[in-house]
Image: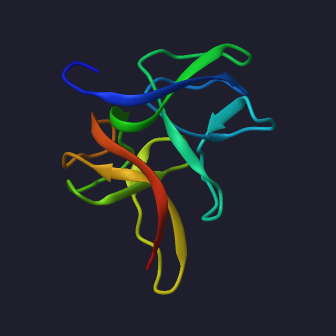
Amino acid sequence: MAGLSATSIKTYVAGAAIPKRRIVKFGASDVQVILGAGAAATEFLIGVTTEIDVATGEPVDVIRDGMADVEYGGTVTRGQPITSDATGRAVAAAPAAGVNNRIMGFAEVSAVVGDVGPAFINPGLIQG
Protein backbone atom coordinates (compact mmCIF):
# COMPACT_ATOMS: atom_id res chain seq x y z
CA MET A 1 0.00 0.00 0.00
CA ALA A 2 2.75 2.41 -0.84
CA GLY A 3 1.48 5.96 -0.54
CA LEU A 4 -1.96 4.90 0.67
CA SER A 5 -3.44 5.47 4.08
CA ALA A 6 -5.83 2.98 5.64
CA THR A 7 -7.49 4.44 8.68
CA SER A 8 -9.01 1.26 10.11
CA ILE A 9 -7.70 -2.29 9.81
CA LYS A 10 -9.32 -5.19 11.66
CA THR A 11 -8.15 -8.80 11.85
CA TYR A 12 -10.68 -11.57 11.16
CA VAL A 13 -10.45 -15.30 10.43
CA ALA A 14 -10.67 -16.43 6.80
CA GLY A 15 -13.72 -18.67 6.28
CA ALA A 16 -12.20 -19.80 2.95
CA ALA A 17 -9.07 -19.05 0.94
CA ILE A 18 -8.92 -15.31 0.18
CA PRO A 19 -6.53 -13.75 -2.35
CA LYS A 20 -4.82 -10.44 -1.61
CA ARG A 21 -6.55 -7.12 -2.37
CA ARG A 22 -10.07 -8.58 -2.56
CA ILE A 23 -13.44 -7.38 -1.29
CA VAL A 24 -14.85 -9.41 1.62
CA LYS A 25 -18.11 -9.82 3.52
CA PHE A 26 -18.97 -11.43 6.85
CA GLY A 27 -18.84 -15.22 6.97
CA ALA A 28 -20.59 -17.68 9.27
CA SER A 29 -19.62 -15.90 12.51
CA ASP A 30 -18.82 -12.44 13.88
CA VAL A 31 -15.06 -13.04 13.51
CA GLN A 32 -15.07 -14.67 10.08
CA VAL A 33 -14.89 -13.18 6.57
CA ILE A 34 -15.22 -14.67 3.10
CA LEU A 35 -14.90 -13.27 -0.41
CA GLY A 36 -17.58 -10.79 -1.37
CA ALA A 37 -18.03 -13.04 -4.40
CA GLY A 38 -21.27 -12.34 -6.16
CA ALA A 39 -22.66 -10.64 -3.08
CA ALA A 40 -26.40 -10.18 -3.18
CA ALA A 41 -27.56 -6.58 -3.15
CA THR A 42 -28.54 -7.05 0.50
CA GLU A 43 -25.22 -8.49 1.76
CA PHE A 44 -22.87 -6.20 3.64
CA LEU A 45 -19.47 -5.76 1.99
CA ILE A 46 -17.15 -4.79 4.81
CA GLY A 47 -13.68 -4.12 3.43
CA VAL A 48 -10.66 -5.08 1.34
CA THR A 49 -7.92 -7.54 2.29
CA THR A 50 -4.32 -6.41 2.48
CA GLU A 51 -1.44 -7.58 0.28
CA ILE A 52 -1.27 -11.15 1.63
CA ASP A 53 -3.08 -14.25 0.32
CA VAL A 54 -4.60 -16.29 3.17
CA ALA A 55 -5.82 -19.88 3.54
CA THR A 56 -8.95 -21.06 5.33
CA GLY A 57 -8.66 -20.56 9.09
CA GLU A 58 -5.79 -18.09 8.92
CA PRO A 59 -5.93 -14.54 10.27
CA VAL A 60 -6.74 -11.96 7.59
CA ASP A 61 -6.37 -8.20 7.90
CA VAL A 62 -9.25 -6.23 6.39
CA ILE A 63 -9.10 -2.51 5.60
CA ARG A 64 -12.46 -1.20 6.80
CA ASP A 65 -12.19 2.43 5.65
CA GLY A 66 -9.80 4.89 4.07
CA MET A 67 -7.66 4.15 1.01
CA ALA A 68 -6.73 0.64 -0.10
CA ASP A 69 -5.36 -1.07 -3.18
CA VAL A 70 -7.91 -3.43 -4.72
CA GLU A 71 -7.84 -5.69 -7.75
CA TYR A 72 -10.33 -4.54 -10.38
CA GLY A 73 -12.51 -7.04 -12.23
CA GLY A 74 -13.88 -4.87 -15.02
CA THR A 75 -13.81 -1.44 -16.61
CA VAL A 76 -14.27 1.24 -13.96
CA THR A 77 -14.00 5.02 -14.21
CA ARG A 78 -12.46 6.97 -11.35
CA GLY A 79 -15.16 8.24 -9.00
CA GLN A 80 -17.61 5.42 -9.78
CA PRO A 81 -19.14 3.46 -6.89
CA ILE A 82 -17.75 -0.08 -6.77
CA THR A 83 -19.05 -3.46 -5.62
CA SER A 84 -17.76 -7.05 -5.79
CA ASP A 85 -17.74 -9.42 -8.75
CA ALA A 86 -17.91 -13.23 -8.46
CA THR A 87 -14.27 -13.41 -7.33
CA GLY A 88 -14.17 -10.48 -4.90
CA ARG A 89 -12.67 -8.01 -7.40
CA ALA A 90 -13.94 -4.43 -7.68
CA VAL A 91 -16.45 -3.68 -10.44
CA ALA A 92 -18.72 -0.74 -11.17
CA ALA A 93 -21.95 -0.74 -9.17
CA ALA A 94 -24.81 0.03 -11.56
CA PRO A 95 -28.16 -1.05 -10.10
CA ALA A 96 -31.30 -0.78 -12.22
CA ALA A 97 -33.76 2.04 -11.48
CA GLY A 98 -35.33 1.61 -8.05
CA VAL A 99 -32.98 -1.26 -7.10
CA ASN A 100 -30.71 -1.04 -4.03
CA ASN A 101 -27.09 -2.20 -4.28
CA ARG A 102 -24.45 -2.54 -1.56
CA ILE A 103 -21.19 -0.82 -2.44
CA MET A 104 -17.65 -1.12 -1.15
CA GLY A 105 -16.66 2.46 -1.90
CA PHE A 106 -15.43 4.45 -4.88
CA ALA A 107 -12.75 3.92 -7.53
CA GLU A 108 -9.86 6.37 -7.22
CA VAL A 109 -8.53 5.48 -10.69
CA SER A 110 -9.87 4.39 -14.04
CA ALA A 111 -9.10 0.68 -14.38
CA VAL A 112 -9.74 -2.47 -16.40
CA VAL A 113 -9.87 -6.14 -15.44
CA GLY A 114 -6.67 -7.25 -13.68
CA ASP A 115 -5.49 -3.76 -12.72
CA VAL A 116 -4.55 -3.10 -9.10
CA GLY A 117 -5.21 0.42 -7.92
CA PRO A 118 -6.52 2.52 -5.08
CA ALA A 119 -10.12 2.76 -3.96
CA PHE A 120 -11.74 4.81 -1.24
CA ILE A 121 -13.23 2.24 1.15
CA ASN A 122 -16.59 3.51 2.37
CA PRO A 123 -19.19 0.70 2.53
CA GLY A 124 -22.71 1.82 1.82
CA LEU A 125 -25.86 1.46 -0.21
CA ILE A 126 -26.93 3.13 -3.46
CA GLN A 127 -30.17 3.03 -5.39
CA GLY A 128 -30.42 3.07 -9.17
Residue furthest out toward the right: 28
Quadrant location, the C terminus: bottom left
Residue 50: x, y in percent? 44, 22
Q: Is residue 98 left or right of residue 31?
A: left
| Nearer to the camera, 97 or 65 | 65
Q: Find residue 34 and report its image quarter.
A: top right
Residue 9: x, y in percent? 48, 26
Q: Find residue 1 and report its image quarter.
A: top left
Colour option used: rainbow
Image vertical order of residue 93 relative to residue 75, above or below:
below
Image vertical order of residue 99 relative to residue 79, above or below:
below
Image vertical order of residue 96 relative to residue 76, above or below:
below
Residue 39: x, y in percent? 61, 54
Q: How many marks?
A: 0
Residue furthest out toward the bottom: 98
Q: Is residue 1 left or right of residue 89?
A: left
Residue 90: x, y in percent? 41, 46
Q: Find residue 29 and report its image quarter.
A: top right
Residue at 20% from the left image edge and 53% from the top image edge: 78
| Nearer to the camera, 111 or 5 | 5
| Nearer to the camera, 59 or 76 | 59
Q: Is residue 119 left or right of residue 38?
A: left
Q: Is residue 113 left or right of residue 45?
A: left
Residue at 67% from the left image edge and 33% from the top image edge: 33
